[in-house]
Amino acid sequence: MYRSALRLSSLGLVLGVLAAPAPAVHGGPVRAAPGPGSYLDSRLPVEDRVADLLARMSLDDKLGQMTQPERRYVRPEDVTRYRIGSVLSSGGSAPSPNTPQSWADMYDGFQRAALAAPLRVPIIYGADAVHGHGNVAGATLFPHDIGLGAARDPALVRAIGAATAQEMTGTGVDWNFAPCLCVARDDRWGRTYESFGEVPELPAAMTTLIEGLQGDRLGGPASVLATAKHYLGDGGTEGGRDRGDTRAAEQELRAVHLPPFREAVKRGVGSVMVSYSSWNGLKMHRNGYLIRDVLKRELGFTGFVVSDYNGIDRLDGEEGFTRDEVAAAVNAGIDMAMVSSDWRRFIGYLRDAVRDGTVPMSRVDDANRRILTEKFRLGLFERPMADRAYLRTVGSPAHRALARRAVAESQVLLKNAGGVLPLDRRDRVFVAGRGADDIGVQAGGWTITWQGAPGPVTRGTTILQGIREAAGPSATVAYSRDGTGVDRSYDAAVAVVGEQPYAEYHGDLTGGMDLDAADLETIGRLRASGVPVVVVMVSGRPLDIASELPKWDAFVEAWLPGTEGAGVADVLYGATAPTGRLPVTWMRDASQQPINQGDGKKPLFPLGYGLTYG
């Protein structure tokens, strides 16, 4: 099914003859259209439709298309008045109540406002659906990218992209700020889990997510625009500092960080997001060489480039943006600015820069041509409203089954002394740990809110619930969060430990990378009982566990599995054999960071390591 053709009882206006042009917001009148609205004729080539529409647009129309406010800071009437081209939901920004239906209603409200402007150019609505439609309560949440990198299954990743696109389509959101194609070179970085791995081959292979999101063709059934991010080198900053500086020769930048973006362009990705970080001291948001010359000309990228959230603000090292920063970013090749609350000032600064020639009109036209081309390709002019037929897919059994399979494939078995795994369905099992019965912990950041949070934040199956379902009807599965109550009567104990939720910047580690003291105490209680101890780690990156590992009978890295914890149990009980392999090198201790394949450092486990049963 395509985006619903219903869309508005008034949508016939969109497909009909243009109304008389209204006055521009701040300048002279909109120029008279040179004839019937041929850009509304879907039978014409996209290039011709774009050219016709551009010829009708005033400067105000064009500036609006280049502007993306956050939904909390823009009203539908602003979208109409300022010809806004896009609106976004940042992490945790959701309508109330947070239901799929409410999202569709919100989206349609903004879209009606866009269609009420003289030229009736639809908006495109963006969100960070980085492991499923994560802002929406009840959506299916898949493993974060590091787990999918461990699974090493491009076809699976394509299917995840398609499922995510369906759930987005039902809510109206038609632009996904994913995939993240960073190559994580330092595990202290708070976005390590957003990376498919430490070598460029892994994220390059997983660009199949783009094909899943956009479909066989952009604008087909349940097709949303994909975004390759963050361009370029964000995974290589010194010290793993988010928004930091990647100090590297161009040869290294090209060899390590560019290949996934080259592959994304080959797969037809519609947008690219620029990184907060710098390359050798120059902020990426003003790096014309890498954006204009390398991305657009050398790689042949024909989509549009969007800034990161308020990414233009700190080009001069100070908060807030100036007119000079706006001009520098646009001239460097940024086509659309994600400017959250201060979007009116952005429009004003850009207008002034165009009028005095600091930003050439040809640059503004190029940006609009790129943005409008993707909107036409996406079919927004014909099908602008949310396709509510897809609402039934949000959190559907089929999507949860796919996620469960992805979770199982992402598990990496790193130790299995004495063959304690797989567990027998008749075993008496004692389960403990802060991550055992907590959807929020196992889903991690970018889940309902930006940083994520522990607790029952959305629907799903915890790892404990999965274990109870996997055990046989006569088996005993006991649970205590801190491990109290375990004794020798159990056949095995499972400790689910690891990291609490976090996201970019706040998740950077500047000190140690040890397990939390509470987790170590829990494991200690289980060990003291004398039963075999299986440690399941829920984390977004390797942690410093070398000194503890000899005390554990088995060790499984579960990454951040999302809402379907039963996939972890599938591996613990042998319903699925472990096949995951490390997408990053596992350090012996935190002092080795950064540690990567081929750097001469001796790891605890090398890149690609992983055991299986039997």
Image: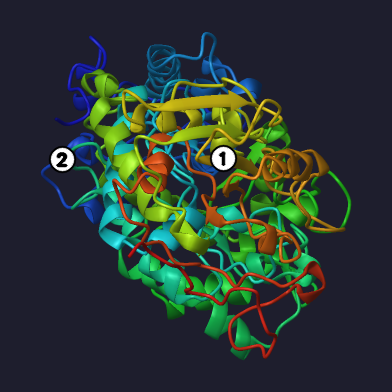
Q: Where is residue 453 in the image (x, y as percent from the top left)?
A: 66, 29
At a point 68% along the width and 65% down the height, the residue shown is: 284
Give coordinates of residue 167: x percent, y percent: 33, 30
- Kindly check if marks 2 and 1 are in contact, taking CB atoms under 8 A apart as contact: no
On the picture, is 96 further left or further right than 398?
Answer: right
| Residue nearest the viewer, comparing 1 with 270 | 1
Residue at 30% x, 62% y is 154
State the residue in front, 79 or 34: 79
- Could you classify mark 2 by the number of other residues whose Cα lies within 10 Å: few (under 14), some (14-19), or many (20 or more)? some
Q: Report the number of numbered marks.
A: 2
Query: Is residue 372 in view?
Result: no
For residue 489, above or below residue 77: below
Q: Which amino acid does label 1 sit on?
A: Ala
Q: Is mark 1 on a helix, strand or loop?
A: strand
Mark 2–mark 1 distance (CA, rounded to whole Å): 62 Å
Residue placed farthest to the front in the image?
A: 489
Give the amino acid type for the residue marked by disc 2 in the picture: Ser
Foreground disc of the pair 2, 1: 1
Residue carrying label 2: 42
- Counting residues from the start of the chain, the first of labels 2 and 1 encountered is 2
Residue at which label 1 appears: 493
Percent of width and height locating residue 378 = 28, 43
